[in-house]
Image (cartoon, rainbow, N blue to C red):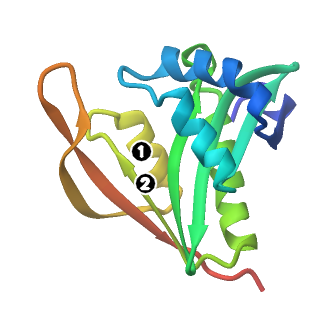
């Protein structure tokens, strides 16, 4: 991991952070979430987190937790900041939050075309458990989602 990632800060997302969140989201994804989706996540009490470096928001993560399970809904790092370990820091943080909330497992979906994200999740212990056909919008048609899961072992 680059020493750059050591200078980051994690903090809960607030409504007034949404302009910066949307800027990163739009730069990172061909089919970004809408501001309304982020507002709904905040209003629903989901785990919504920002990662900042030198007081600049460079990414975000969203996690829902209910009934002993959690779902990593969105992990985004600005393209200019990718490859420095920030994504791993965010995912580790969301896994910690899932454990704190007593989740026993974490699920997520990832595009098969997003090999960097897939490798990150695989290296962190996630296993592929299924496919959701035509899950994501794409430039032409739809793209499947690979469903990954991680069993959370309680730390003794």
User: Where does the image place residue 73, in percent across and percent down from the top left?
Assistant: 50, 49
What residue lies at 60% left-to-right and 67% top-to-bottom?
65
Residue 16 in the image: state x and y as whole percent: 78, 26
- Label 2 sits on a secondary structure element that is helix
Instruction: Pick out the residue farthest to the left.
Output: 141
123 to 11, vertically: above or below:
below
Front position in the image: 134 or 75: 134
Q: Nearer the viewer, residue 77 or 48?
A: 48
Query: Label 2 to label 1, Cα distance in Å?
Result: 5 Å
Can residue 85 be seen here? The reply is no
Q: Is residue 43 left or right of residue 4?
A: left
Instruction: Report whether 52 appears left or right of 72.
Output: right
Of residues 147 and 83, the one drawn nearer to the viewer in this rendering: 147
> What residue sits 42% from the left and 23% below the top?
29
Residue 122's tag is 2
Residue 58: horizontal and vertical position, in percent?
69, 23
Q: Secondary structure at mark 1?
A: helix
In the rendering, which numbered label is found on residue 119? 1
Query: Left or right: 146 with respect to 118?
Result: left
């Amino acid at each position: 991991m680059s020493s750059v990632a050591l200078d980051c800060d994690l903090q809960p997302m607030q409504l007034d952070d949404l302009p910066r969140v949307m800027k990163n989201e739009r730069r990172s994804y061909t089919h970004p979430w809408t501001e309304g989706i982020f507002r709904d996540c905040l209003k629903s009490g989901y785990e919504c987190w920002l990662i900042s470096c030198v007081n600049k928001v460079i990414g975000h993560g969203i996690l829902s937790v209910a009934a002993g399970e959690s779902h990593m809904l969105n992990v985004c790092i600005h393209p200019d900041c990718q490859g420095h370990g920030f994504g791993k820091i965010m995912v580790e943080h969301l896994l910690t939050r899932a454990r704190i909330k007593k989740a026993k497992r974490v699920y997520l979906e990832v595009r098969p075309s997003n090999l960097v994200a897939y490798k990150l999740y695989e290296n962190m212990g996630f296993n592929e458990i299924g496919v959701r056909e035509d899950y994501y919008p794409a430039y032409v048609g739809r793209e499947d989602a690979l469903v990954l899961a991680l069993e959370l072992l309680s730390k003794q």
